Amino acid sequence: MGTDRVEVREVRGKGKGLFSGVPFKSGDFVAEYSGMKIPTTEANTSSSRYLFEIDDTWTIDGSDESNLGRWVNHSCDPNCEASIEQGRIIIRAARSIKRGVELTIDYDQEYFNEFLKEVCACSTVRCRSRAAN
Ligand SMILES: [Zn+2]
């Protein structure tokens, strides 16, 4: 047991996920989506599934396991949101989150189409794959 802000844990049926190690208030810093900065043009042909676009020029390839942001799973009704702040990708709480809760963000439609398709496992009422059925 530590007092880390976030913890990587196994999620049944989904591999690993990121969990809150402390309670968060809406707007609190959760983690940075960090990694190697690559040109966005190059990212368009990459097969990495951990690409996060900053802008038309730069994309972060967050494949490295030291990137805590890569463990954040998609949810169609997420409790966190990612935004670009001064060229960095920052994940913040979008609402109050208790300790020990899985942290999720809503990856964009492109990611959803490419990697989740109709098998999104977020199981929320607002799930887009559920709506498609
Ligand atoms: Zn979903």
Image (cartoon, rainbow, N blue to C red):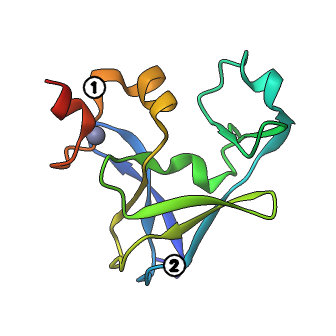
Q: Secondary structure at mark 1?
A: helix
The three-letter amino acid code for the residue at tag 1 is: Val
59 left or right of 52 in image: right
Give me the C-alpha separation between circle 1 and circle 2.
30 Å
Beta carbon at label 1 within 8 Å of ligand 1: no
Q: In the figure, 128 relative to 48: above or below?
A: below
The three-letter amino acid code for the residue at tag 2 is: Gly
Please state the quadrant of the image where ligand 1 appears: top left
Q: In the figure, 46 relative to 10: above or below?
A: above
Where residue 87 appears, as percent x and y from the top left, is 81, 57
Point out the frontmost of discs 1 and 2. Answer: 2
Q: Which residue is mark 1?
A: 119
**Residue located 69% across and 40% down the image:** 53
Q: Which residue is mark 2?
A: 27
Residue 84 found in image quarter:
bottom right
Q: Give whichever of discs 1 and 2 has the lower sequence position.
A: 2
Where residue 10 appears, as percent x and y from the top left, is 38, 49
Where residue 73 appears, as percent x and y from the top left, is 43, 46
**Residue located 79% across and 30% down the image:** 40
Q: Secondary structure at mark 2?
A: loop
Q: Residues within 10 Å of mark 2 (few under 14, many from 20)?
A: some
